[in-house]
Image (cartoon, grey):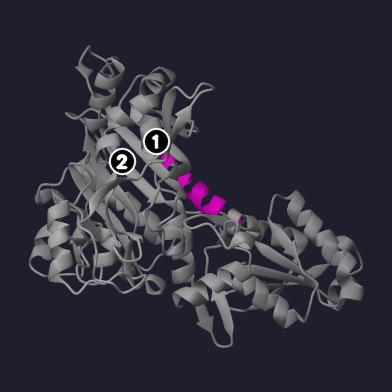
Amino acid sequence: MKYDELFALLRRRGVLWPSAEIYGGAQGLYDYGPAGARLKRRVEEAWAAWFVGLSDDFYRIDPAEILPEAVVRASGHLENFTDPEISCAKCGAHFRAETILEKFRPEGVDGLTPTQIGALLKEFPVRCPNCGSTELSVPRPFNLMFGFDFGAAGGERAYLRPETAQNSYLAFSRMWDVGRHALPLGIAVIGKAYRNEIAPRQVLFRMRAFTQAELQIFFNPSSFPLPFSSVSNEGLPVLRVAQRAAGQEAPELRSARSLVDEGLPEFYVFFLVHLYRFFRDVLRYPSEAIRLFEKSDTERAFYNRIQFDFEVKLESLGGYKELGAVHYRGDYDLSRHSAGSGKDLSVALLGGERVLPHVLEVTFGVDRNVWALADLGLVADGDRTVWKLPPYLAPSTAGVFPLIKKDHAVEARRWLDQLQKAGIDAEFDESGSIGRRYARMDELGVPYCVTLDHESLAAPSPDARTATLRDRDSKTQERVTLDTLIARLHASRVAPRPRPLNAVG
């Protein structure tokens, strides 16, 4: 589905729309409607169940979103969290260099100096997207953080967090005491991050306020035992730096073991596999649409030693887009915050050894994946549009309809009430023909529809009554009792989960 068509459908069905829409919208800010808010929450819950559920020593916290200036100075964000900016001398518009140059340099501009980017502006026939002028400036670094004066007197400086990761590093010392005094220790955060994007675009992909899900795993760099044999034969669609240097764009299917044989650490590849499985088995993205894109020394973020971005091919946005990543950050974060705070963040392990933990980060863009689920899941099926969401991600599990509004509404309301009491999200719809009601539910990804009709009321008692259960994808229908329906819907809400690292036997 094309970008404009997809966005129009999501707005029409109450999934999302521009913030402050009645004032013309606010660039880079979007609101989730009823369906979108539920879908987003389901994605967050599935991510937490998969990754936080990996270990009894992985915890989820909910920290503050405002950081004192000392934190972002120590983390390197004051100095390094910048994007090269290009401005037009004729109309005064400002753009991200990556946006201006993407047609001429698809691999992006990560790692290039302002001088090198300025040379590209002269080399290629680049024009201002706003007015068409070729009078584009040599780019200057633009810090992406939102800063503001803090406190009643305004004498302190603070920033909205540019990523959720920093909260986990700040919480590490406290969580060491809260936990079992053992490594590895995982700290997860799902919440808002804020970036003053130069040119927000592509709806949920370049936003100024967005939701991240990130797991920071603190581990002993000399010992990170994991059951690697359980993933060693997993095939991963990787595009490594050497392949790209040879002009290759398509990924190659490589086993996890072969990547370790080439020098990647076992612990790193182990979590590559688990993020890949989450995309494939939980979100159900087609494996042929996924690639693991390795960033080079000059491309990766300033804090990373190893970085693979998880990219998925999206028709609405014209190609591969980053939806998550695995970062090996080494001891960068704890060493910086140890120096900045004056607090020793090393820990004493059993046996007396003292270590400064290294960090492995698994990061996931919640909003971007909401869009990707729509791009990949909304398909044409004859004369209908169907959003083929996994049932455990769908905004609602079932639509409940009276076949005839006048005759069947009371019984339909009774079934709806029983489903909701059983903890099942269901929606009541009595407007329009039954075909139109099916179509509305199909577009929202609701996996089942329940219709109460004459046969339902013909049963000798309420407990013996049945309804027609329709499956979204196959369109098959069957008669079910209320108890059978509740059991069926509950089973459909269970998402796949990995085997916990702490599992015995």
Mark linked to residue 430:
none
Residue beneath disc 1: 55
| Observer-nearest of 255 and 40 | 40
Q: Position of residue 189 (x, y in %)?
A: 44, 38
Question: Is 43 part of what is drawn in magenta?
Answer: yes
Badge 2 density bin: few <14, some 14–19, many ≥20, Cα 10 Å: many
Between marks 2 and 1, how big is the CA–CA gap?
15 Å
Of mark 2 and mark 1, the one earlier in the sequence is: 1
Badge 1 density bin: few <14, some 14–19, many ≥20, Cα 10 Å: some
Q: Quadrant of residue 126?
A: bottom left
Indicate left or right for 444 with 306 as reference.
right
* Residue placed furthest toward the front: 90
Numbered disc in front, either 2 or 1: 2
* Residue placed furthest toward the bottom: 382
Q: Residue at x 68, y 56 (%)?
A: 425
Question: Is 53 part of what is drawn in magenta?
Answer: no
Q: Secondary structure at mark 2?
A: strand
Residue bounds of the magenta highlight = 38-52
Q: How many marks?
A: 2
Amino acid residing under circle 2: Glu
Q: Position of residue 332 (x, y in %)?
A: 22, 31
Residue 505 in sight: no
Residue beneath disc 2: 361
Q: Secondary structure at mark 1?
A: loop
> Is 439 placed above or below 309 here?
below
Q: Residue at x 48, y 44 (%)?
A: 49
> Is 431 placed above or below 220 here?
below
Q: Position of residue 274 (x, y in %)?
A: 33, 50
Q: Residue at x 19, y 30 (%)?
A: 221
| Observer-nearest of 501 and 260 | 260
| Observer-nearest of 192 and 35 | 192
Amino acid residing under circle 1: Ser
